[in-house]
Image: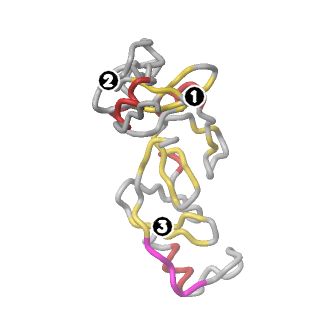
Amino acid sequence: MSAVDNNPRSILTDHRVCRACNKPITDRYVLRAIDSFWHEGCLKCACCECRLGDIGSSLYCKSDLILCKRDYLRLFGIPGKCSQCNKPIAAFELVMRARDNAYHIECFGCQVCRKRLVVGESYCFHDNKVLCLDRCAREIQAGKMAGKFDKQTKNLKVLKATSTINGL
């Protein structure tokens, strides 16, 4: 008859070796990433060396590099294009967003009268266009812009302009 170890903790920790330092892991918390185990202090971003266990559960791997989200986007992020001017928007550039569209800060404005809109200002998004609330959205509701848009509507949803960093 063979001896059976009924303590699952000892069974699990006997085989856990940190991928970074090759030392056994006996800590209370163990990180598991990329089919390997890590000490909390050993799983770090290859660029900025931030501890990935401290900042959340997301990490990115590319070209044998383990990276935090910020460094991954900085190195490999695909720049988007501004919905107004069609020029590239670099990763981590400050942008304005309206639904799924991103805009350079200086390009975000009413697409009818060209009034520039700033963070916190109210606007409407209609027929995939940003409209100022002051004049253009009201004229659409009143039916004064027939022919300028694919759709006419009496009910426009008012939104607040906000800025974000591209890629986040």
For label 3, the SS is strand
For label 1, the SS is strand
Observer-side mark, 2 or 3, equals: 2
- Locate residue 145 relative to residue 21 in the image: left or right: right
* Residue sticking out furthest to the front: 1
Q: Which residue is mark 2?
A: 26
Tell me whether the residue at label 1 lies in contact with that at label 2, contact meaning CB atoms closer than 8 angstroms.
no
Magenta residues? 153-158
Q: Badge 3, how many Cα within 10 Å: few under 14, some, many 20+?
A: many
For the residue pair 85 and 98, the one nearer the viewer reads as 98
Magenta-colored segment: predominant secondary structure: loop
Q: Residue at x 29, y 26 (%)?
A: 27
- Locate residue 50 relative to residue 81 in the image: left or right: left
**Vertical placement of 10 versus 150: above or below?**
above
Label 2, label 3: how many angstroms apart (C-alpha)?
A: 60 Å
Q: In the rendered structure, which amino acid carries the disc numbered 2?
A: Thr
For marks 1 and 2, the one nearer the N-term is 2
Label 1, label 2: how many angstroms apart (C-alpha)?
A: 26 Å
Observer-side mark, 1 or 2, equals: 2
Q: Which residue is mark 3?
A: 132
For label 2, the SS is loop
Residue 61's tag is: 1
* Residue 115 among magenta residues: no
Observer-side mark, 1 or 3, equals: 1
Q: In the rendered structure, which amino acid carries the disc numbered 3?
A: Cys
